[in-house]
Amino acid sequence: MKISSKLLNVIRQNGSFLIAGHINPEGDAIGSILALALGLKKIGKKDVYLLSRDGVPEILKFLPSAKLIKNSPPKKIYDVLMIVDCNVPERTGFKDLTGKNTVVIDHHIPPGDSDSAEFYRSLAASFIDPHAAASGVLIYKLLTALKIPIDKNIAVNLYTAILVDTGGFRYSNTSPESLQTACHLVEAGARPWSITKEIFENIPYKSMKLLGLSLATLDKKDGIAWMTTTADMFKKTGATSEDSEDFVDFPRKVKDIEAAAFFREDGDNTFKISLRSKGRVNVEKIAKSFGGGGHFAAAGCKVKGTLKEVQEKVFSAVRAAIKNAK
Ligand SMILES: [Mn+2]
């Protein structure tokens, strides 16, 4: 997908930039906003403010210039507000965030409701490509279009962004484009094993203990495999919800299933549910029916009730989806 000259001009013609990622950020959000900021600084844009409401997760603190990221919005109005790896101001955690010009750079499908239609009309420019594996791919294209040289620090941030969103170059979004971009980033100085160690071989001990307790709940029925982490398990291990971030990957690895679910007790009779598809079932639709969202193969939602009630609701929705996929 081509970058509009509008977007390039908005960047070239302005001096100050507020760059915001989304709440509960992962490698793509953090790596993309950092790479964008480092790139803009290279072409003389000194006034760049990086915003992530939930800061930088522990595991991403190795990223070059991660310390630049702030978790509260600036006082002044910036020339350009850049919303990255999400597509509405609400997702940044600050719904009143503004700039003299607003730009969206994202790889999620934009919402179709009327409220966001107005927001989209107000945009100075956008670069939205739902086919891109990661926002990191889009930032790479943008920096290249602006003729900004990709140095090692930018490369490490962007490689991490793509590595995380493709699950280590394994998910179905691992395309020629994402691999080619990664190739350029390795040439520019990103070292795959050193980044892989930080991202995938760096599990805190308490998180591994939490995984042990949670894995004991693994179960399988009707083409669904699932696993649960209770509030009690968090208490026993001293781990937090951040430690269970990718637990859904474990039921997903089970042979002969169509979908995987991970139930995380959030207290107050509420469960956070992560859903994964093995390729045929659209879990985004299921998550949406519970007020959540995501992608075809990875989605999430929150459901109130006891564990048993919540699981029954979710399983019957997944069973129906499996049946319809046949
Ligand atoms: Mn992303």
Image (cartoon, grey):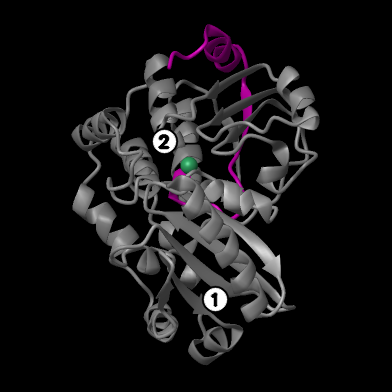
Q: Is residue 4 magenta?
A: yes
Q: Which mark is residue 240?
A: 1
* Residue 61 in view: no
Q: x, y percentage for residue 97?
A: 75, 37
Q: What residue is at 23 percent from the left and 33 percent from the top?
A: 188
Question: In the rendered image, which quarter is residue 223 located in?
Answer: bottom left
Q: Considering the image in quadrants, where does the N terminus appear?
A: top left
Image position of 167 (left or right of 244): left
Q: Are marks 2 and 1 in contact (CB under 8 Å)?
A: no
- 201, above or below 288, in the image: below
Q: What residue is at 50 percent from the left and 33 percent from the top?
A: 107
Q: CA distance from mark 2 to mark 1?
A: 27 Å
The amino acid sitting under disc 1 is Thr
| Magenta-colored span | 1-28
Question: In the rendered image, which quarter is residue 19 located in?
Answer: top right
Question: Is disc 2's CB within 8 Å of ligand 1?
Answer: yes
Q: Which residue is mark 2?
A: 136
Helix, strand, or loop for circle 2? helix
